[in-house]
Image: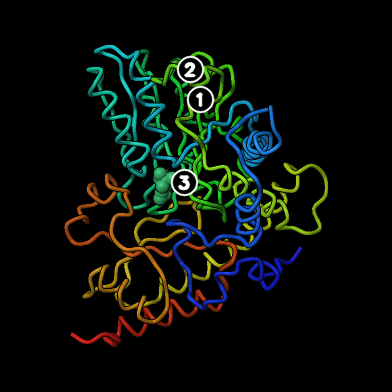
Amino acid sequence: MPFDIARIRAAYPALAEGFVHLDGAGGTQTAGPVVDATAAAMRAAMGNRSAAFAPGRRSLELVAAARSAVADLLGAEADGVVLGPSATALTYTLARTLGARWRPGDEVVVSRLDHDANVRPWVQAAEAAGATVRWAEFDRDTAELPTERYAQLVGERTRVVAVTAGSNATGTVPDVPAIAAIAHAAGALVCVDGVHSVPHGPTDVAALGADFLVTSAYKWSGPHLGAMVAAPATWERLRPAKLLPSSDAVPERFEYGTPSFPLLAGVAAAVDHLAGLDPTATGSRRERLVAGLSAARAYEETLLERLLAGLAVLPGVTVLGSPARRCPTVSFRLAGLSPQRTQEELGAAGLCLSAGDYYAYEYFQAMGLRDSGGAVRASLYHYNTVEEVDRLLGELDRLAAGGGRMAG
Ligand SMILES: Cc1ncc(COP(=O)(O)O)c(C=O)c1O
């Protein structure tokens, strides 16, 4: 099925403003049905969760609908979906909870390719427990994360292996199932950061071998909320710090405070929206999600190829890494212009891109690029077009030739 980009774009009201959004990794635009569902929930009579009266039941239903939607998106069980304010907050909760059981001599394995949200919570939990941190290094040229190194890093004292399913800096998609198999053979738990990978194709938490997988709805057309999934039986074994009167049930005991019910309506609407990306798809919501996100991935790959081919022939452009499997995300630097200046020049032309380290702190530190401003990132999403990719390439060509728009 050809990807009907005009139909797709019409679903995002913000695109009417005319900016070129090339920062999906930093957050996508919000789909119209998400805006509508959130507003409808805010307009409706609403109470805190209670089965005793209709507005209270409405809140209960919104929570249940959000869990069921995220479960369909990730191939998980609704009772294993923990909802929270952000992927960072959820990972901190998990790391503190697991870390409370670690002893000196225990080990955790983190990667230098990960966003700091799947690094620092583990490093700090290890410090608090006197446990040891072991680092998986990436290949400096390709930005691949070699699987075979995990065989040396993981041992009988490894408690957790934390790894990304998609780098938000280089787009690298590591071989998470193989890494998880090594971790599981040693009895370790696997925590996968799916924040950057989930928007770009179907996700199956079991196929990945993830004991825990975290995602953020604002990276896939939804509101600023996160979710972490695990098997309900896995959550049952864990006891987080919590308030005395709050629910002790799974998954509620991992959720702090009163959730934003209207934004949860937006989460479910975002998943329904993704399930409609391929209008010819039929079957369960999960099946339509797999079809829709597969179609989106195929379309994004054509844009990525065009972007990479265009960058390769631009003078003065250096692309960071060349991973074999990648999300449609590319970091690059322009000779003679700092990443921040490049970002500002592009911004002045109406193109929105990230610059810096985008919290992929260890990656840029290891590359020796943090002090010189990191890189510029072009991160594609399924609402981007060939014309937008060409506009970026054209602007970069002009900048490479010394033709900045901004004075000074
Ligand atoms: C790969 C990756 N992991 C984690 C995060 C953190 O997500 P959140 O903002 O929901 O805490 C981000 C955010 O950019 C990310 O790109």
Residue 405: x percent and y percent? 30, 87
Amino acid type of the residue that numbered disc 2 sits on in the rendered structure = Ala
SS label for mark 3: loop
The label shown at residue 166 is: 3
Q: Which residue was labeled with disc 1?
A: 181
* Mark 1 CB within 8 Å of ligand 1: no
Please report whichever mark, 3 or 2, sits nearer to the chain's N-terminal start. 3
Of 122 and 32, the residue lying toward us: 32
Amino acid type of the residue that numbered disc 3 sits on in the rendered structure = Gly
The label shown at residue 76 is: none
- How crowded pointer 3 is (Cα within 10 Å; few <14, some 14-19, many 20+) is rated as many
Residue 385: x percent and y percent? 57, 73
Residue name at image x 34 percent, y 28 percent: 109
Q: Which residue was labeled with disc 2?
A: 185
Residue name at image x 29 percent, y 88 percent: 403
Which quadrant of the rendered structure holds the N terminus?
bottom right
Of 164 and 354, the residue lying toward us: 354
SS label for mark 1: helix
State if disc 2 and disc 1 touch (CB < 8 Å): yes
State if disc 1 and disc 3 touch (CB < 8 Å): no
Which quadrant of the rendered structure holds the C terminus?
bottom left
Is 158 left, or right, of 41 in this rendering? Answer: left
* Mark 2 CB within 8 Å of ligand 1: no
Residue 293: x percent and y percent? 65, 52
* Mark 3 CB within 8 Å of ligand 1: yes
Amino acid type of the residue that numbered disc 1 sits on in the rendered structure = Ala
